Image (spheres, grey):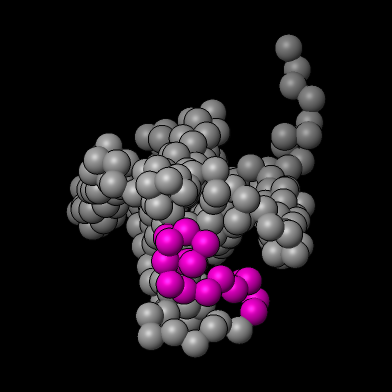
Amino acid sequence: MSSTAVRPASRPLNFWVCLGIPAIAAITLLLLELTSLDMSLAKLFYDPVAGEFIGRHNRFLEDIVHDRAKQVVIAFSVLAIFGFIASFFVDKLKPFKRELGCLVLSLALATAFVTPVKAVTAVQCPWSLEQFGGHETYSELLSPRPPTDKPGRCWPGGHAATGFSLFALFFVLRDRRPRLARKAFVFAFALGTVFSVSRMMQGAHFFSHNVWTAIFCWLICFGAYYCILYKPASKTERESEAQPVNT
């Protein structure tokens, strides 16, 4: 981030991109509920001979990609909290108080929404279903849940949210450091995708679970940015930018 104390006017927002693409993705996912895509993709990671998913007991996926990677993101979130607190007292951080606050809020909301939504939706994990050696009955997202003594806790994806929550970095950086913001977006998308695929390999989530999670995380981070950081250029600033520069 720039060290300037004056927060710059925000770069123009393309709402068709920021909201339109997630809306199209959500509609597509609802239509995909009419197909067997989720089940077909899950079968690619299931070994019927062994009777389990290929990554179910993989130490690398469980210890490194799941546990350690999540701990790194949590540690980053803790540092962001300390940075936000320090911005009230440390002169060098005071210009970035709003950015740090937005970062903390975005990370918190983009991960905290997962657990209560899981409890409400009660969607079963692939590894719990009859098709993959479990005892539970599959049901589409918008369908009633079959009776069970063990309601599912698999929609949306918690581990995917850990990665996609870093979309917050893109928004926090977009006005001061746009190039770095684009790199942050690629990183967050890549990390969320890696986390998503790893959990699919373990049988913890269907493909659609993770895409829904990415949509939610994007919208949460976008909403926090719009409410806290978005600062449209004033009429004077726009007119100044439009005037030709004499050389």
- The residue positioned 63% from the left and 71% from the top of the image is 140
Percent x, y for residue 185?
52, 38
Percent x, y for residue 160?
44, 52
Q: Nearer the viewer, residue 152 or 115?
A: 152
Residue 190 vs 12, above or below: the answer is above
Residue closest to the far front: 49
Q: Nearer the viewer, residue 244 or 186?
A: 186
Please state if 242 lies on the left or on the right of 40 as rendered: right
Q: Nearer the viewer, residue 197 or 183?
A: 197
Magenta stretch in the rendered image: 127-143
Percent x, y for residue 229?
51, 55
Please state if 16 lies on the left or on the right of 47 as rendered: right
**Residue 22 found in image quarter:** bottom right
Quadrant where the image shows the C terminus = top right
Residue 246 vs 145, above or below: the answer is above
- The residue positioned 74% from the left and 21% from the top of the image is 245
Percent x, y for residue 221?
51, 56
Residue 74 vs 125, above or below: the answer is above
- The residue positioned 61% from the left and 84% from the top of the image is 144
Total numbered badges shown on the rendered structure: 0
Is most of the magenta stretch helix, strand or loop?
loop
**Residue 127 found in image quarter:** bottom left
